[in-house]
Amino acid sequence: MKKTLKKITGFQLFLPIVALILVLLFNMIKTPDFFKITVLNGTLYGFMIDIINRASELAILAIGMTLVVASSAGTDISVGAVSAVTAAIICFSLGPDQQNYQMPYLIGILLGLLGGVLCGMWNGLLVAKMRIQPMVATLILFTAGRGISQLICSGQIIHVEKESYRILGSFIPKVPLPTPVFVAAALALVTWLVLKKTALGMYIQAVGINRRAGRLIGINSQLIIFMTYVYCGLCSGIAGAIMSSRIAACDANNIGLNIELDAILAVALGGNSLGGGKFSLLGSIIGAITIQALTTSLYAMHVTADQLPIYKAIVVVIIVTLQSAEFRKWISSLQGKRPVKAKAAS
């Protein structure tokens, strides 16, 4: 029994899953209709649907962030700003015309994603080739990204008036689940298949654990790190396209604002080490859902947006502490002392 329990608790996703369950149980007690789902015109609505919907872009960013953290032992704090750049490019390309797009819809989306990839290439160049510390390297776009977005849009909020532009961030007609859920699921599946069916996942872990050792066995460490940052830029672009579609506009000051912090927290809550190496995409996705569930539940309890970070920080500190290796060692040491005390008493 002890071995089985130890095996279960030692599972990498054990604590992330427990954290999500605890948040959902709290919601069930505090808000009785939290799990209620209604159908209106063939579309599903409810707190749970809102959670998976709003967690979609965060999960997408968490996927890219996971690979960056695993390969470089550093975080990309520019993902929110890169999302804003992508949104600006897309809205500028498609234009505000109510009747027609300035260019084909798909071309506008691809141009936006290309902008995200170029931002990822810039970050990857600084980290992999120039060997600048990741947080410092990505701080450049974190600072300048929204300014670039403002330049693209000439300081204006460009609204894309065509109703079809909202589909990516809302619902496909006659489909009950929100479109972002399908986008996030597809990206997660493709990423998982590439990492599992090729040696790329192993290479990322090897470089993250020991870059020099990876190089000695023939792995191009610089290329691996560069690729993860490029992919993170692509993920930021996809998330930016969804955020822009939700409001049918580019708002450089607000799109993706502070979402990089939630993306890093999602990686940490997923049981991934921020020191690089072994990683779990599923853990990061669970972490993203947990954070969004917490946010949604706090809003349901009428917590204001200004107070939200305080409650979120408290819960996150508790969850991260429970996942800490030092905390586990401390618990193990307490368990190891109990039999000794019992023996001494007898």
Image (cartoon, rainbow, N blue to C red):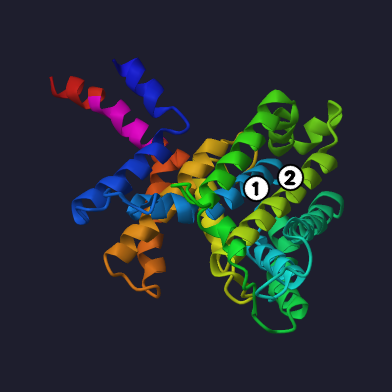
Q: Can residue 241 be seen from the camera position used here?
A: yes
> Disc 2 to disc 1, how far (Cα)?
7 Å
Residue 25 in the figure: left or right of residue 205: left
Residue type, label 1: Gly
Sort mark 1 into few (<14), some (14-19) or many (20+) by Cα contacts within 10 Å: many
Rendered residue at 26%/65% (across/down): 301
Rendered residue at 14%/24% (across/down): 345
Residue named by callout 1: 64
Residue type, label 2: Thr
Element at badge 1?
helix
Q: Nearer the viewer, residue 167 or 279?
A: 167
Secondary structure, magenta segment, majority class: helix
Q: Quadrant of the C terminus?
A: top left
Q: How many marks?
A: 2
Residue 72 in the figure: left or right of residue 346: right
Q: What percent of the width, then of the height, locates residue 26?
A: 25, 50
The outermost residue toward the front is 99
Residue 122 in the figure: left or right of residue 70: right
Element at badge 2?
helix
The magenta segment is 329-338
Q: Earlier in the sequence, mark 2 or mark 1?
A: 1
Q: Quadrant of residue 18?
A: top left
Is 331 one of the magenta-colored residues? yes
Residue named by callout 2: 228
